[in-house]
Image (cartoon, rainbow, N blue to C red):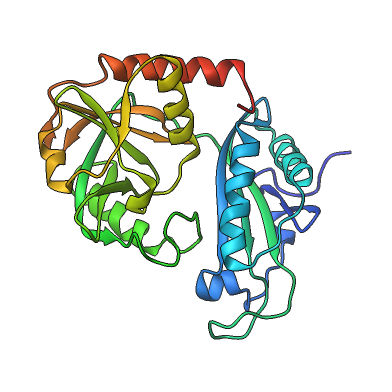
């Protein structure tokens, strides 16, 4: 039987129900809306199957724990992702799980209502072969309460990414309070300097990216030496090559830093890592 809903309306999973977006009701007192009391994960799904779901769920658990948020079980959310991709007719999809504190008072204090849990899907955005990055005059606080967590408090990222786009780049790179290289608004960064492959350690305040972790494991398997060490943000101007990692980007070489073209773009170990990662994605749905 044909649906009476317009085809343009998306179907989402919310609190164990599959609903079209016009049927969804979220309280105006939801703590995620009012204070950013929420966490999320973004995944890529192919043939409606979310990639690396177990790793994403484990990170979601860690983020939720800091906020005192309860999650549905892993298989419940895994099936919800599949159901949402199917319901929207998406073989390749960008899937997001969002968990918020539910209805609460207007201040920072939590309420007694159950969490709001939403699984939504959209078209998988196409990524260019290379990307441009700029450093921004804002810092990550590596000692902050939300350091290393994937939360809905994304205001800093919105401002920084707008700054990058206004300056002809596709990603903004943060330093931290100590003045060291940290991360992008939605990516981790690897650099090659003086022949050494380097990425910021988690103590820098960067997000423990799922793709970052997979790349580190692939480097070990491919005998590519990589070190996790603090590097001054100012040294980003002197790197030979760099690449970003994220769920949506995969392994993406950097073309320019602050408008200056890098000496090596996408060659050497960067290409080897990219090939190994693409093979992993093609052969394993939940590595």
State the image coordinates of residue 257 (x, y, percent, origin top left).
17, 37
Q: Residue at x 27, y 19 (%)?
A: 266
State the image coordinates of residue 173 (x, y, percent, origin top left).
26, 47
Quadrant containing the N terminus is top right
Q: Is residue 84 left or right of residue 207?
A: right
Quadrant containing the C terminus is top right
Q: Can see residue 248?
A: no
State the image coordinates of residue 15 (x, y, percent, origin top left).
77, 59
Q: Quadrant of residue 141?
A: bottom left
Q: Residue at x 40, y 46 (%)?
A: 186
Q: Quadrant of residue 179?
A: bottom left
Q: Can see residue 102?
A: yes
Q: Is residue 14 above or below residue 126?
A: below
Q: Is residue 155 above or below residue 211?
A: below
Q: Is residue 30 above or below residue 9?
A: below
Q: Residue at x 19, y 48 (%)?
A: 135
State the image coordinates of residue 269 (x, y, percent, origin top left).
30, 17
């Amino acid at each position: 039987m044909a649906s009476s809903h317009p085809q343009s309306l998306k179907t989402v999973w919310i609190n164990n129900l599959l609903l079209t977006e016009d049927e969804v009701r979220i309280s105006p007192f939801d703590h995620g809306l009012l204070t950013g009391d929420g966490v999320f994960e973004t995944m890529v799904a192919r043939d409606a199957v979310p990639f690396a779901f177990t790793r994403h769920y484990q990170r979601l658990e860690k983020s939720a724990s800091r906020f005192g948020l309860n999650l549905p079980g892993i298989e419940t959310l895994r099936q919800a992702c599949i159901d949402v991709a199917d319901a929207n007719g998406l073989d390749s999809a960008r899937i997001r799980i969002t968990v918020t504190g539910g209805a609460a008072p207007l201040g920072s204090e939590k309420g007694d209502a159950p969490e709001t849990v939403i699984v939504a899907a959209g078209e998988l955005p196409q990524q260019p072969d290379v990307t441009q990055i700029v450093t921004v005059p804002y810092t990550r606080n590596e000692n902050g309460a939300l350091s290393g967590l994937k939360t809905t408090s994304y205001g800093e990222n919105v401002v920084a990414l707008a700054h990058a786009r206004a300056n002809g780049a596709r990603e903004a790179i943060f330093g931290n309070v100590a003045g060291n290289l940290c991360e992008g608004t939605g990516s981790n960064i690897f650099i090659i300097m003086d022949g050494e492959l380097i990425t910021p350690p988690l103590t820098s305040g960067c997000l423990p990216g799922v793709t970052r972790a997979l790349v580190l494991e692939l480097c070990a398997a491919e005998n590519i030496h990589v070190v996790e060490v603090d590097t001054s943000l100012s040294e980003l101007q002197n790197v030979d090559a760099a690449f970003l990692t994220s769920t949506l980007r995969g392994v993406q070489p950097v073309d320019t830093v602050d408008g200056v073209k890098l000496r090596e773009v996408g060659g050497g170990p960067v290409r080897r890592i990219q090939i190994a990662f693409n093979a992993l994605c093609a052969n394993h749905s939940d590595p």
